[in-house]
Amino acid sequence: MSSAPILDQIESKNAKFFIQFGGQGSPWLKELTKLYQEPALKEFFDVTFETISKELARTENKSLYDKGFDLKSWLENGETAPSDDYLCRACISVPAIMATQVGNYILLVSKGYDADRLTAATAASSGHSQGIIAAVLVALGKKGNDFLKAYSDFLSLEFWMGYRGQESYPDFIVSQEIVDKNLENGDKNPAPMVAVIGYTKEELEERVNSFNKENNLTEKTSVYISLYNTPDSMILSTIPESLLAFRTKYKAEMDEKKAKFVYLKTTSPFHCPFMNSTWPTFKEKDYDYLAFNYTGSDLKYPVYGIFDGANLQECKDLKERLFKTVLIEPLYWDRAISVIWNDPSIGAILDFGPSTVSQKLTGGHLKAQEIEKDSYCVSSPKEAKHLFGAE
């Protein structure tokens, strides 16, 4: 029996994969702990621990890491791991999520999905939010030690993106007053990002614009539609106080429409102008320090941007582009994945997690267009059985 049956199928049909990676908001520790048990990933984890340790030593604001960042200890003994509230801090979760999805990729390769074959069988790729960075890394088509060297460079970039993002929003402990007022609305775990499900793009944009104008809000207090995930599911980003006020204003309408309002497990308002200040700081302190000199011409197949859908193969400065893509610019998931329904050669979607969130978001777009495509998520034990030919 083949160890790469889905790759065999794609090649036999002369078809191609669309490869995608997830972003913030998914729990990662359990998935990464499982990967840590895989002997084939020992070198990968050595590089991961070394890279994080090196970058951690360079940080200035130690208060962001008041419970440390001893990833190795957390993976070896889950009881030493901090709470989920700590693990979802951007300065922790951004590099940890990168490690999880790249670990999933290396595991797939080690179990029979040869990197050269997989690269040749891929039509295009993208990643939801920070997943775009893992997508670019894999699209380099590197193998072995060359891949691990590139991975370390990319992980360092992710580390500083998470750090600067959290540094720009350091007061992420939500006050009890805000918690209590959210509970009065029936909402738990307030955060600077929230999913609103049940409005069209035009309906939500109208309400956000009206709310900001009525309250004369500033760059740091305005509500922003930060992620356009599916036709009826979007994310709002800003300070929790403004999200609470927006929710309170429209709660009766949301209840009538049966719209959902669900806070994300994240601690920074990504993909919006609130984060504008992160770029000048990164440019001054981190840009030249990082050994990241990759350009779009290094990519073996198109990686489509999540802001404008542009092919990153045409990008000269990936370091700047990726930083602004993940922290500042809004995300339009349909623009990143439209090749799936525009390119008839794409026969299957291959998702590297973490979790199955990005797989479901893509599925939402396909369902809306009444298109069916095979979809496999390496994070799913059930789908991993199909990928590896085990029943």
Image (cartoon, helix red, strand yellow):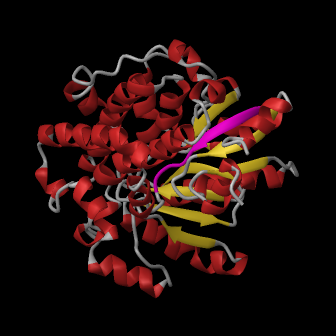
Q: Is residue 48 left or right of residue 389?
A: left
Of all residues, the one furthest to the bottom in this rendering is: 184
Q: Is residue 68 left or right of residue 125?
A: left
> In the image, residue 258 lies at what x, y percent?
69, 77
Instruction: Give the image quarter of residue 309.
Output: top right
Q: Residue at x 36, y 39 (%)?
A: 44
> In the image, residue 287 lies at what x, y percent?
27, 24
Magenta-highlighted stretch: main secondary structure?
Answer: strand
What span is colored magenta in the figure? 15-24
Image quadrant containing the N terminus: top right
Image quadrant containing the C terminus: bottom right
- The answer to which of 310 and 238 lies nearer the viewer is 310
> In the image, residue 382 lies at what x, y percent?
66, 62
Q: Residue at x 49, y 39 (%)?
A: 106
> In the image, residue 160 lies at what x, y percent?
28, 38
Q: Is residue 365 left or right of residue 344?
A: left
- Let me know if residue 22 is in the magenta part: yes
- The answer to which of 358 and 315 lies nearer the viewer is 358
Q: How many numbered marks, from 0 up?
A: 0
Q: Residue at x 45, y 39 (%)?
A: 326
Is residue 129 visible to us here? Answer: no
- Let me know if residue 301 is in the magenta part: no
